[in-house]
Amino acid sequence: MSTQENGESLEEAVQNLQYMQQVYQNQYTTISREINAVMDYINELNAAKTSLEKFDRIKDSNMLSPIGSSVFISARAASEPKALVGVGGGYLIEKEIAKAVEYLSSRIDMHTKNMQELMKARGKAEDAMFEISARLDKILKQA
């Protein structure tokens, strides 16, 4: 049985690298899921922002309002230019439409930056997987 420079057997080196590769694969998968969730949330924020930006066109008109589980009721948009905006923890704050749009824009920016950081972390995990794969190939060719 061959040994590596650090004193571990070839079999141990392969097992350790395979374990590390699996750890990085799990990180990659988890981060990818987080990126998808953040992207979905950013899309929701953008849709809400777009609707608020178009509020002048829909005020005082009939619309369908979702109440959950794909159930809608007929509603009338009030002419009062205010919106209830979720700020976390189940709390809502009443804001003028322009302020609500600003708030949503800031949330979109924040989550976009978070997504970029997640993408960097995913790239590092991917790089580590490729490096480990190359090391595994090298070790297995030496065997």
Image (cartoon, rainbow, N blue to C red):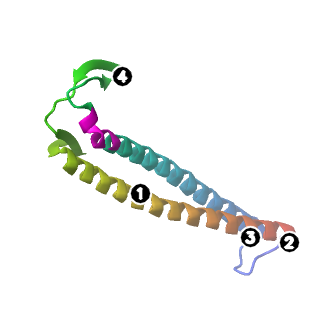
Can see residue 12? no
Find disc 1 in the rendering and name its residue: 112
Tell me whether circle 4 and circle 2 mark residues in contact (CB < 8 Å). Answer: no
Which residue is under mark 3?
A: 135
Indicate the secondary structure of the residue bearing disc 4: loop
The verdict on residue 101 being magenta is no
Q: Which residue is mark 4?
A: 69
Residue 61 at what x, y percent from top left?
24, 25
Question: Marks 1/3: CA distance?
Answer: 35 Å
- Which three-letter amino acid code belongs to the residue tagged 3? Arg
129 lies above or below 4? above
Q: Secondary structure at mark 2?
A: helix
User: How far across and down, in percent of the image, does residue 89 sit?
Assistant: 22, 44
The rendered magenta stretch, by its main secondary structure, is classed as: helix
Q: Which residue is mark 2?
A: 142
Q: Position of residue 106 (x, y in %)?
A: 30, 57
